[in-house]
Amino acid sequence: MINKRLLIKNLLAHNDENSFYDKKRVIDISHKEGKAKFLKHVCALSNSNPKNNSYIVIGVEDEDNNIIGVDFFDDSKIQNLINAYLTHPPIVQYENIPFPHLPDDKVVGLVTIRSIDKITSLRKNIWKYYGGSVFFRDGSMSMPKVFDIEIKDVNSAIVSAIESHSQNNIEHTLDGVFDFLNTRQDYNPKYKVFKEYFVLCWAGLKKSVKNEVFYSRVDIKLINEQVRLFYSTLDEVSISYDEDSFKIIEYVNLGLQNSYKYYPLEETIINFSNNVSYNIETTLIFEAPQFDKKVLHHIYNTNNAILDKLKKGLSLDKNETEDLKNLPATYLICYLNLFHEAIDKLHEAKPFLKNYSEEMYTLYKESVRILRKVKYS
């Protein structure tokens, strides 16, 4: 099984950017330009490598290959983006790979692209690229080209050699387990071996709520492949496992008038197979809680009145300050209950919450994070 950290090092050491490998300091698919450029590179690498994997390494300086890292990328719906915009979309996986010299909140992003051996093209217009465009790699550049019916395979031998030199060994595995147990000993670290091969370590801050157990600050690492999943202080998840799989369910705590409940948001399952392979499946399982419309109208109008005062620079009284803490979450609930304008109000509130306090801005970001996951589904 491939150790992804070694694979990244071998890619960086073996070649500069070429027809099977690209590197980026950062990617941003939160806006159209960033999405378009990412899709262009995926399309080009897929078309240039019909018989083998292609890779994009993210978090690396272009000039000197210095590994600087990027933030965790938790958008598990990246394949949905690929499928929506590309014809004959390749299979794409994004993984967060930790490196010892990086801070705990930084990783290297590794995008693995596996062609389905058909010409990939843009399905529809995005940014300045037209639907129907076909891209190939020309050295380190992704360029639109007229293509032949037959795609030449020139990289399989090189990629196979790089991947074979990135295989695990027992020393790497043991070092990885001991390092995890030592660095996360403050959160009761554990490990489990799946299918007599895969070693998974995990740790988290435990919290009990009405006979249910949740965890935050959860760190999960597949030692063999140096793949890491991470849930922050704001996240609350449940963890379960059997002999074949490891399951994480992320919850959101939503409610009105000091009556809150945990709702399942997203389920991630790591499935282990007997053929020494694994896959990570993430599914949105959120069902929006429904509330009395009269109550929501009252809360919605209260939120709007508070937002108007913030816009005018007026001070809030004690009760309004307490209501402000709930404003992002209640705007989100209103939106999920078909108050369509509530989402615009939430975005209007962003600069005022950011200026008000770090706590208020954190609550805003949490609501937007939930919204983003729901919309990506």
Image (cartoon, helix red, strand yellow):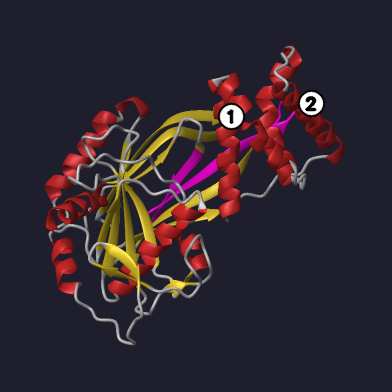
Q: Position of residue 260 (x, y in %)?
A: 68, 32
Q: Position of residue 235 (x, y in %)?
A: 50, 35
330 or 301, which is in the foreground?
301
**In the rendered view, does 277 fall on the left or right side of 213?**
left
| Residue denoted by label 2 | 305
Q: Is residue 337 above or below residue 143?
A: above
Q: Secondary structure at mark 1?
A: helix
| Residue denoted by label 1 | 363
How far apart are the two marked residues, 2 and 1, measured between alpha carbons? 19 Å
Which residue lies at the image location 26% right of the left edge and 29% below the top edge?
183
Which residue lies at the image location 38% right of the left edge and 49% below the top edge?
27
Q: Secondary structure at mark 2?
A: helix
Near mark 2 (Cα within 10 A), the count class, few <14, some 14-19 or many ≥20, is few
Is residue 285 visible in this depiction of the protein?
A: no
Which residue lies at the image location 64% right of the left edge and 37% below the top edge?
347
2 vs 1, front mark: 2
Which segment is the magenta one? Answer: 237-261
Residue situated furthest bottom in the rendering: 149
193 or 375, which is in the foreground?
375
Quadrant of the drawing holding the N terminus: bottom left
